[in-house]
Image: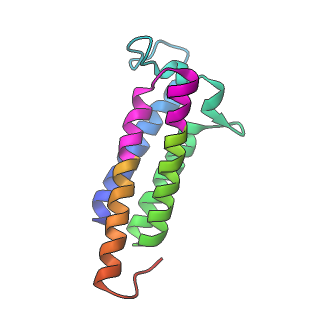
Amino acid sequence: MRYLIVLLALAGVVVSTLALRVHYSTDTQPCSINEKWDCGIVNHSPFAVIANVPVAAIGIAGYVVLAGLALFRRRGLLTIAAVAGLAFALYLSHIEKDVLMVWCLYCAISQGIILLLTLLSAGWFAAGRMGRRDARW
C-alpha cells in the first residue's frame, strides 16, 4: 500500500510542478481550454500565492511530505497530513468555483490525487490498527 501512496504522491508532484510552471509563465497555456477551464487565470490570480509562496510550490512540498511519511510507514501522521491537504484543496476548489469562476485542469487532477491519497492512507491506517495494537503514528 505504501508504494501505491508514494506513486500517487509523485504524480501529485508532477501535476503541481506543471501548475507551478504555469504560475511563472506568461505564454498561452495548454490547459487554457475555454472560459471555464483556464489554468493561467487561476495560477496568476491573487489566490495562487500565500505569503509570497506559490500554492503550487506548497503542493509540491505537501506531496513530498506525504511520500516520505508513507515510506517511513507513519500511517497516523500520513492520514492527518492527507486530510489537511484535502481540506486545503477543497478550499482552493471553492475559490475556483465561487470566486474566480474558472477551473484549473491541473488543480482538478491534484484534487483527485489528494482525495485518493486521503482514502488510501485512512484505509491503510485503519488496517494497521485492526491488524496490530501498536500502529505507529
| Residue 74 in sight from this viewpoint | no
Q: Residue furthest bottom?
A: 133
Q: Residue at 40% x, 34% y: name it.
A: 108
At x 42%, y 16%, the residue is 32
Image x and y of residue 28, in percent:
47, 12
Query: Looking at this view, is 74 or 131 the one in front?
Result: 131
Magenta stretch: dominant secondary structure: helix
Query: Residue 71, can we see it?
Result: yes
- Residue at 50 percent of width and 27 percent of height: 97
Q: How is the image coloured?
A: rainbow
Displayed quadrant of residue 11: top left
Q: Position of residue 47 (x, y in %)?
A: 63, 30
Q: Is residue 98 above or below residue 52?
A: above
User: Where does the image place residue 86, in percent across and percent down from the top left?
Assistant: 47, 49
Return the x and y of residue 10 as percentages of the image width and height: 37, 49
The residue sitting at the front extreme is 98
Query: Foreground residue, 113 or 15?
Result: 113
Q: Residue at x 27, y 65 (%)?
A: 1
Residue 50 image-quadrant placement: top right
Q: Nearer the viewer, residue 13 or 37?
A: 37
Q: Is residue 80 magenta?
A: no
Magenta segment: 92-113
- In the rendered image, the vertical position of residue 121 relative to residue 96, given as above or below: below
Vertical position of residue 61 compared to residue 101: above or below: below
Please state the total of marks drawn on the protein image: 0
Q: Is residue 130 above or below residue 64?
A: below
Q: Quadrant of residue 126?
A: bottom left
